[in-house]
Image (cartoon, grey):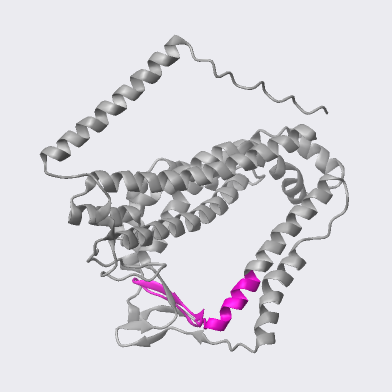
Amino acid sequence: MIPPSPPPPASWKFSVRDALIAAGAVTLAGLAVWNVLQNMQGAGLAPGFAFLWQGAGFDVSETLVPYSPADPYARAILAGTLNTLFLAAVSLVLATVVGLIVGLMSVGPSPIARAVAGAYVEIFRNLPKLLVLLVLFVAAVTGLPHVRQALSLGPVHLSNRSLLFPVPVLEPGHALVLAAFGAGCGACWLLARHFARRREAGQAAPPLWPFVLLALGGLPLAVALGLGLPFAWSVPQLAGFDYEGGARVSLQFMVIAVTLALYHGAQIGEVVRGGISAIPRGQTEAAHAIGLTPRQATRYIVVPQAVRIIVPSMNNQYVNLIKNTSIAIAVGYSDLMSVSGTVINQTFRPLEMMLLTMAVYLAICLCVTTQLNRINDRLRLKEGRA
């Protein structure tokens, strides 16, 4: 099949109408900026971001970086941004897994599975996400036991306050182990690209998972053993009214991640169902004719073709999920929106903080959409070469 010819280059010739539209847009933007500046001057405020380096004076409930109330507002905003990124990353993975399972159930041969998937989609697609969050939060707070009666599975403890689990104790020498792990990740990425090129060229390629185990597990372990680095674990232990040691994930984080996974999992499930339904029935019939089982036909024939269809819609769902992390403020999770609200209340700098918050969300969403658009372009290029 001859690949499609590239589209002609866009023309940059402006008509009079285009010039008038551009001039009107610039004029409206200038009037808006002038109006805001006049109002701020009338209130005795000078626009600027110097307040970011003043002491914050408030605490952030949980952070991925060291933070104290003595740190400046910029540090607090960084902590809130990282919390938002972490919440979005976990929720995206969970929602994608849930959506894939629901989408496969909705087109499967079992009528019961199709009915369950359909009911799940209709329920969560027609409920406000904030209502789902509040219901799950109240259920978790009242249904889970208190800290002293926490549900324990070995060193892992779950209560109505948090989830605690052991973590390794890192020492200065362990930086080399982390560097080895990073090198292993890079090696796995290069191997994956190399194997993909071999398969595209019609050549045989070995499975990737043995190399992944060797690079991500064997290489860091070899470095640790070679340097004689000790390994110790920080295990949570009950001390008084709370646990000490280990790492913890707050109940608020878990409830928000589950809410976003369930809500957007229903949306993604419908996207997956539509993509699979768009594959001609003859594809699966041909797969069965050559001896593939239904599971193999789904894995090797249907899903790879459906991915090319669902990626553009998944782009929209991922962006919506990232923006919807802002509902975390309803249960007290210190995300970017929560920190921004506190900064506004203390500094009375709503315009600057709103612009900064909008810029952060815009940057995150643009990064995600850019990567997904690149994936979509690669898939379409491969389809054109097929």
Q: Which residues are magenta?
A: 154-181
Residue 327 location (% of width, % of height): 34, 51
Placement of the C terminus among the 4 image quadrants: top right
Q: Residue furthest top?
A: 16
Question: What percent of the width, then of the height, locates residue 374?
Answer: 62, 41
Splitting the image into 4 quarters, where does residue 343 fall? bottom left
Tell me: residue 45, above or below residue 181: above
The answer to whether 322 is drawn above or below residue 22 in the figure is below
> Residue at point 28% right, 60% down?
53
Query: Is residue 160 in the magenta section?
Result: yes
Count the labels in the image. Answer: 0
Which quadrant of the figure contains the N terminus?
A: top right
Where residue 149 appears, x then y in whole percent? 36, 81
Task: Give the residue displayed 52% in from the left and 56% down from the top.
Answer: 94
- Residue 55 is a magenta residue: no
Expressed as whole percent of the image width and height from the top left, the position of residue 338 reads 29, 55
Q: Seen in the image, is 344 located left or right of residue 214? A: left
Q: Identify the residue at horizontal 30%, vertical 88% (top origin).
A: 240
- Residue visible at 75% across and 38% down in the picture: 382
Residue 303 visible in the snapshot: yes
Q: Is 247 situated above or below 205?
A: below
> Residue 201 vs residue 84: left or right?
right
Query: Which residue is at the front of the view, 88 or 66?
Result: 66
Q: Does any portion of residue 321 appear in the rendered image?
A: no
Q: Is residue 355 above or below residue 7?
A: below
